Image (cartoon, helix red, strand yellow):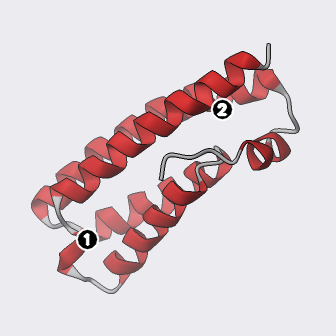
């Protein structure tokens, strides 16, 4: 799930390494906040907050070329929309945070190798 669509990432950033670096740096901090809030929301069962954050995260992940992760956020958003209590668990949210960190390391390596 931590694969990177480098072609899509390049297309969305027009191959500009400076834009890629800036987008990456901003996204890492943003996703850290997303994941902290998702963990909290899962712990309290706040499905509206889960839905809201998952919606933002799916778009951000897609921009970064993290298509599989984006699909997982989309699934969580849809489940929260249906108010399905099954998705509101801390383990799922922690798995997303771990997967994002793994994917972000791959993306950072890809960007740095383009120098």
Name, please, the residue furthest toward the left: 44
For mark 2, give the secondary structure.
Answer: helix
Structural crowding at the residue carrying mark 1, measured as other residues with C-alpha within 10 Å and reported as few (<14), some (14–19) or many (≥20): many
The label number, if any, that marks residue 47 in the structure image: 1
Residue shown at 79% from the left, 46% from the top? 7
Residue 103 against residue 81 in the figure, above or below: above
| Position of residue 108 measured from the top left corner of the image (x, y, whole percent) | 60, 25
Residue shown at 58% from the left, 49% from the top? 66
Separation of residues labelled 1 and 2 (CA atoms) = 28 Å
Looking at the image, residue 55 sits to the left or right of residue 108; the answer is left
Name, please, the residue furthest toward the right: 14
Structural crowding at the residue carrying mark 2, measured as other residues with C-alpha within 10 Å and reported as few (<14), some (14–19) or many (≥20): some
Say if mark 1 contacts mark 2, CB within 8 Å: no
Indicate the quadrant where residue 18 lies.
top right
| Position of residue 3 measured from the top left corner of the image (x, y, whole percent) | 56, 46
For mark 1, give the secondary structure.
Answer: helix
**Residue 94 vs residue 22, the one in the foreground:** 94
Residue shown at 33% from the left, 41% from the top? 98
Q: Which residue is disc 2 drawn over? A: 23
Number of numbered discs present?
A: 2
Residue 113 against residue 48 in the figure, above or below: above
């Amino acid at each position: 799930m931590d694969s990177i669509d480098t072609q899509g990432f390049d297309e969305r950033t027009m191959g500009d390494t400076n834009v890629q670096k800036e987008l990456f740096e901003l996204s890492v901090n943003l996703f850290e906040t997303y994941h902290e809030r998702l963990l909290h929301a899962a712990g309290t069962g706040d499905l509206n907050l889960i839905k809201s954050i998952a919606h933002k995260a799916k778009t951000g992940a897609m921009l970064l070329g993290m298509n599989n992760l984006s699909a997982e956020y989309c699934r969580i958003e849809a489940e929260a929309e249906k108010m399905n209590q099954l998705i509101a668990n801390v383990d799922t949210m922690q798995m997303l945070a771990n997967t994002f960190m793994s994917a972000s390391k791959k993306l950072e390596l890809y960007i740095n190798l383009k120098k």
